[in-house]
Image: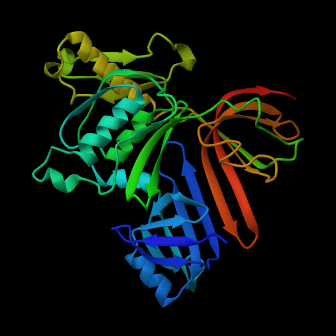
Amino acid sequence: MIIATIYDNELTVIGNVVQWKSLIRTELLRGAGEFEMKLPASPTAVSCLLQGYFISFSDTPEKAFLIESVEPDILQNDMDTIVVSGRDLKALLSLRVVWGLQKVSGTPWNRMYWLIHYQAIAPSSGNYPENRVIPYLQDLARDGDDSGDTVEASQFTGDNLLDTLVSVVGTNECGWRVELDVRDQQITPIFFTGTDRTGTVQFHNLLGNLKNLSYLRDIADSANVAIIGGEGEGSARTYNNAYSADYAGLKRRELFVDARDLQSEDYDTKSAYNTALQNRGIDKLAEHTLVQNLSFDTVSGIYQYGIDFKLGDTVKIVNTDVLGISATARVIGMQISDDSEGHNETPTVEILDMEVVV
């Protein structure tokens, strides 16, 4: 049985939950994951949850969550059941915005490091910068290679810090997590890079470890060319573009990016200013990529999540009897559910390459 431990905002234990009806946890490579737990209502449980700030689970105590909602199970009209939910510790960064103008360069790790450091660990902006410090938060650590696209100059102002970090980590093999260490009272964000496991991990209908496969492809909101408008008005306005030479005809999908907040006077050269415009366009294009996802349930006994494969890893997915496809895909999410019917794991992946194998 998985035991839930509830902590207050000083990381002091205020209670445990040992009886629950269902538990669903979702982990994401880039954004904040979520949890939802249903348990029998009782004065003790409700009191602990209402006072609680953090919650962790005994099977993965470092993967803690914020308690953000506590309410009766209204959807099932069951007032004797409490539904508690929230997001993982990445959500702590959503409590801050980028105050002032912050310029960052380099790899995703480097840019994320300085955004977290100056906005939540050692802030200097604002009337009371010391009040902006997030308790227990450490500087961004690195687990493995410092991979990802290098950017010469990006700047942010007024953006939600979590949204900014998600945009900086990008859409490649990079990801990040935030871990809780109660003993040392530390909350540590960690940058990591996935591993290519296509030679060792294969989900295949003929192997019996692939079920409930679903597939989604949506191009409606996608774009591959950015037209960026910078400073100036009318015919005097400065424009630049990103990837304009790479796409033509029906394959070209344009996106306009208003970057009027970027001013040339903030840059040493015209070239640096144009680079900043292009980087803004690239960042916005990352929000409008082709949506092409596979999701499926795994069958326990062959591969174990967290040991044989993890978030960010590349795996092989083959389905010959229904879709007739063979895909190389990156694991970008994992939903782990436990209830009276047992344990179930549902990965979400993004397709890197796919071929028809009919």
Q: Is residue 136 above or below residue 119?
A: below
Residue at the far bottom in the pictured view: 43
Residue occupying the point 49% across, 83% down? 45
Q: Is residue 131 above or below residue 355?
A: below
Residue occupying the point 50% across, 71% down? 5
Residue 326, x across and y down, in percent: 78, 31
- Image quadrant containing the N terminus: bottom right
Residue 149, x across and y down, in percent: 45, 23
- Image quadrant containing the C terminus: top right
Which of the two residues, 115 or 145, is positioned nearer the viewer here?
145
> In screen coordinates, is 15 left or right of 215?
left
Count of numbered tags: 0
How was this image coloured? rainbow
Residue at the far left in the pictured view: 127
Residue occupying the point 38% across, 55% down? 186
Residue 181, x across and y down, in percent: 44, 57
Residue 201, x across and y down, in percent: 76, 37
